[in-house]
Amino acid sequence: MGETMVEDGRPSGTRSLGKAGLVVGAGALVGLAVEFHWLGWTSFPGNSCGGKYRPCPEGTTPTLILAFVLTFAGFIGLTAALAAFTRARPGRAVPGALVAAGVLIALWPGWQAYLWMRGPVLDRAWQAGPDRPASVRGVGVWAVGEDAETVVRARTDALVAYDSGSGDRGWVLRAPVRESVCAMSERIVDGIGLVAFARDEKPCGTVWGVDVSSGRKVWERNFTGRTLLDGGGGVLSADAGVAVALGDRSLHGYGLTDGAARWTVKPTAAGDEDDAECEPVTASSAGGITRVAVTCGYYTDFHSAWILTLDTATGKELSRRALPVESYLSSAAVLSAEPFTLLVEEKDERGLAAVLSYGDPDDPKREPVTIPLTADEEDLAVTGFDPKFTARPVFRTVVADGNLIVAAAKPGADHPERVAAYSLDDGRRRWHADLGATVVALAPAGRDRVAVLGDSQRLWTLTAGDGTRVGEEDGTTVRDIAFKLDSGPQLVRAGDGWVIVNADGADRPPALALRP
């Protein structure tokens, strides 16, 4: 038997197939409409978005526009296609199956289109419960492991370890009764971190060596501590099997694994000031060398400041050079141990306020490169606002690829909305990036890259060499962290995501994680 012919000369079966295709296509439009509605409306962090502090993901607006367009086009097309198909082939089962097929066919392409429109997004993976008692505060952070598998947050009363993948709370090491954490080592060496304690309004004079894998106190030493400069850190450092602690007019070296006393150094001034009292201010240890900034003669007319270079293993002084200051130091902090980079601010308001870069700090003939904290182009925002991490301070700086990369504020601006890079070789600005959002955290992001977290809930990745933006020009949207960050959080790279640690853990999460 031959196929039945219709008036236009095409077989009726072929025409039925065409009408079936129209039904499938209309079903796909309806499927896309439903999918885009779902994806668009559920993409709002906290069920609302918009504005500087709660931005919508990049693709939200086009997704919802397409959802409404496809809603009208899909239902009108589906109504017409079903009417045409059922005239040729009455029934309900086949049209329903064709519509379902169209919907299913559209799901995967619709998802891919949505991802392309939305761009990269970081979602909150977990957040830690609030600090209890509420009176404690965070004072420092350690990242444990190559990919920061564990993040240790120091509170005034304890060290608390979190699994960076799950947020599970691990070990807890309590501070001695009536003592608070006052200092931490900058880095962990051979699995040992250093932490110091002090009583109320007393010097920092008890130091523990802590096994960061288990939270076990390995050893304890007591020494005559000193009153710390505001927010400087650098009281404890470790390298080459030695723990270095700054004391009252002295430096102490202890065995890193056993706490055995190795050496004690009492720094002295040079030249006419040999009788002047000297106080260590901040130190760093790396490559078998400890460098310490000392200030001498605070109560005399012969004031001076020096950088002493010591052999970490023996405490022997290898060299010294004068710091270019004339008044007492109001703050000093090591921003990088290698290359040695020092933040210095004098008490004299007309004195030095700069970052000093030493290509070779042991070469007395080479003058340090000076990068002023305030200049014609911008003001450097090295330190953040309160609350601060006082035991292991957080600086909005990264030293990478021969540059000091730092948050900066344009002249007259209230907040730093720029990232600038200054060469450590000559002090000149190499590049800057205006972000249009206040920089709340700055951190290394892999080889020769830095990450910048803005208060607009965007995270940018920049190359350290020239400031090129990696990925989206407007950064990655970070969802559902509005009002969960204090003014100076610490950003820690952990695997393919990030952990953010707050100093204020009572009103905000002590720690939370972001994942793609």
Image (tube, grey):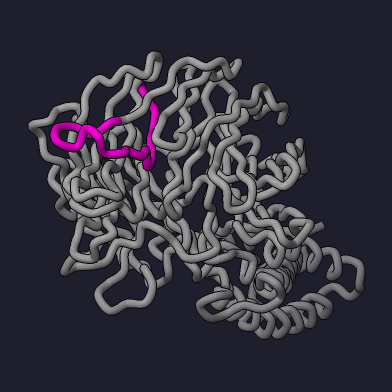
Outermost residue on the left side: it is: 365
Q: Work out whether residue 146 or residue 383 is closer to the camera in this orientation and state it.
A: 383
| Residue 160 in view | yes
Image mark count: 0
**x, y percent for residue 301:** 19, 50
Q: Quadrant of residue 148?
A: top right
Q: Work out whether residue 456 or residue 71 is closer to the camera in this orientation and state it.
A: 456
**x, y percent for residue 271:** 14, 32
Q: Work out whether residue 421 or residue 191 is closer to the camera in this orientation and state it.
A: 191
Q: Is residue 324 left or right of residue 10?
A: left
**x, y percent for residue 371:** 20, 53
Residue at figure coordinates x 14%, y 28% from the top left = 363
Residue at figure coordinates x 72%, y 47% from the top left = 178
Q: Quadrant of residue 469?
A: bottom left
Q: Which residues are magenta?
A: 268-288
**x, y percent for residue 224:** 52, 34
Query: 318 above or below 115?
Result: above
Residue at figure coordinates x 15%, y 52% from the top left = 428
Residue at figure coordinates x 24%, y 57% from the top left = 353
Q: Is residue 342 left or right of residue 108?
A: left
